[in-house]
């Protein structure tokens, strides 16, 4: 019985080797006929749009028009985007009397300049200038299909009050909200 099992094992081993020997050349012939090969590769990068923080701009004594404050803001957006800009008052407004009192003005108009370097595929600068009063209802600014590559520059320049008497004494301010959303 042992001799029979041993003989069967040897025979099975020879048959298996014969199978491999006869199938290998057919497989090798198929490989030899291949001239190109496509390999599917996949990956993903999540979209993101985020703004850094902006510190408060303090103009100090508001005695003359043309004062300017500039802020460089971090902007990370790896897809085209739209920016929303909205102001609470649209001018630096007196805290208690934004309409002024008597001959004294209660607000200082301003102009906001926004510059965003983008790539689409060439680098360019997308910029807009907004009068403060137009920001009360909100404005939009598009990246024009570009992605942000080097932050954003905001420049706020104060205008003239138009009042010969000047400004009413007190604290002045405005809040400008900037939002960003991927397209």
Image (tube, rainbow, N blue to C red):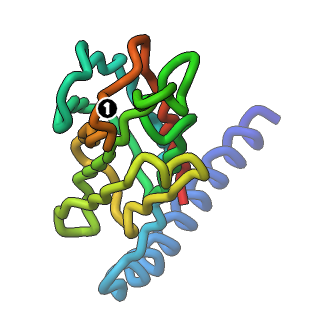
Disc 1 marks which residue?
74
**Which of the pair 64/183 is nearer the observer?**
64
Whole-percent x, y for residue 10 in the image:
61, 47
Which residue is located at x 25 percent, y 48 percent?
A: 149
Q: Quadrant of the N terminus?
A: top right
Residue at the (31%, 59%) spot, across then down = 128
Q: Give the image location of residue 7, x and y in percent.
A: 67, 46
Give the residue at x 53% y 28%: 98
Residue closer to the observer: 11 or 168:
168
Q: Position of residue 125 (x, y in %)?
A: 20, 60
**x, y (%) of residue 70?**
21, 32
Q: In the image shown, does 144 or 97 lie closer to the viewer?
A: 97
Q: Which quarter of the figure has residue 16?
A: bottom right
Please indicate whether residue 32 sits to the left or right of residue 117 in the image. Answer: right
- Mark 1 lies on a secondary structure that is loop
Q: How many marks?
A: 1
Q: Is residue 9 placed above or below 125 in the rendered structure? A: above
Quadrant position of the C terminus in the picture: bottom right
* Quadrant assignment, res 71: top left
């Amino acid at each position: 019985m042992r001799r029979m099992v041993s003989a069967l094992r040897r025979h099975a081993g020879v048959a298996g080797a014969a199978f491999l020997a006869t199938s290998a050349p057919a497989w090798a012939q198929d490989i030899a006929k291949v001239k190109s090969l496509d390999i599917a590769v996949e990956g993903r990068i999540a979209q993101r749009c985020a703004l850094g923080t902006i510190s408060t701009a303090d103009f100090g004594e508001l005695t003359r028009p043309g004062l300017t404050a500039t802020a460089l803001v971090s902007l990370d957006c790896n897809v085209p985007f739209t920016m929303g800009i909205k102001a609470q008052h649209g001018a630096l407004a007196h805290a208690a009397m934004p309409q002024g009192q008597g001959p004294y003005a209660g607000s200082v108009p301003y102009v906001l300049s926004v510059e965003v370097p983008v790539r689409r595929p060439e680098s360019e600068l997308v910029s807009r200038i907004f009068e403060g009063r137009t920001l009360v209802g909100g404005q939009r600014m598009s990246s024009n299909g570009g992605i942000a590559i080097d932050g954003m520059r905001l420049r706020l320049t104060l205008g003239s009050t138009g009042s010969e008497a000047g400004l009413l004494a007190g604290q002045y301010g405005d809040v400008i909200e900037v939002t960003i959303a991927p397209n």
